[in-house]
Amino acid sequence: MSEPGDINEINFDTLKPEEFENYLPELFATGDGKVSQDPRLQKFLAQNPDCAALVSDLETIAETARSLFEPVEDPSDKVWAKIQSKLREESAFVPLETEADGVKEID
């Protein structure tokens, strides 16, 4: 297969599925990960269900990969309050350690 040309010069109405695959990397790079929503491709994808399925799968993979790098939110103040409450509750029942001459509380 030949190298893909400028993506803006492609006639998507006459594009063959095997040629389409050559353009996928650039389409994803310039389409914000939503190739299936590109108006230029609507007719092509409707006529080529295998290509549409491939695009759908790749969009799912890209979205999943992006979500792996999203920042994880810190627990809410309510969660921290519950943790503190539970720690206080448990510290009220600290076991005692016996010593030879008496009893001492474990820190």
Image (spheres, rainbow, N blue to C red):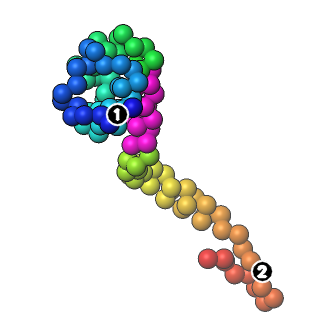
Residue 95 is situated, as x and y percent measured from the top left of the image, at 71, 69
Q: Residue furthest front?
A: 2
Which label number is shown at residue 98? 2
Which corner quadrant of the image does residue 98 belong to? Answer: bottom right
- Residue at horizontal 25%, vertical 34%? 5
Q: Is residue 100 left or right of residue 44?
A: right
Q: Amino acid at mark 2?
A: Thr
Q: Looking at the picture, tell me which residue is in the foreground, 87 or 26.
A: 26
Q: Quadrant of the C terminus?
A: bottom right
Q: Looking at the picture, tell me which residue is in the foreground, 39 or 89.
A: 39
Residue 16 is situated, as x and y percent measured from the top left of the image, at 36, 19
Q: Residue furthest left?
A: 8
Up-down relation of residue 78 to residue 48 (above or below):
below
Secondary structure of the residue carrying numbered label 2:
strand
Up-down relation of residue 107 to residue 27 (above or below):
below
**Eye-nearest disc, 1 or 2:** 1
Upstream in sequence: badge 1 or badge 2: 1
Which contiguous range is marked in magenta?
Answer: 53-66
Residue marked by disc 1: 2
Question: How dense is the environment of label 1, judged by Cα within 10 Å: few (below 14), some, or many (20 and up)?
Answer: few
Q: Quadrant of the N terminus?
A: top left
Q: Residue furthest bottom?
A: 101
CB atoms of marks 1 and 2 within 8 Å: no
- Residue at horizontal 31%, vertical 15%? 44
Residue 87 is situated, as x and y percent measured from the top left of the image, at 55, 61
Q: Amino acid at mark 1?
A: Ser
Q: Is residue 61 magenta?
A: yes
Does residue 91 appear in the picture of this structure? yes
Q: Looking at the picture, tell me which residue is in the foreground, 81 or 65.
A: 65
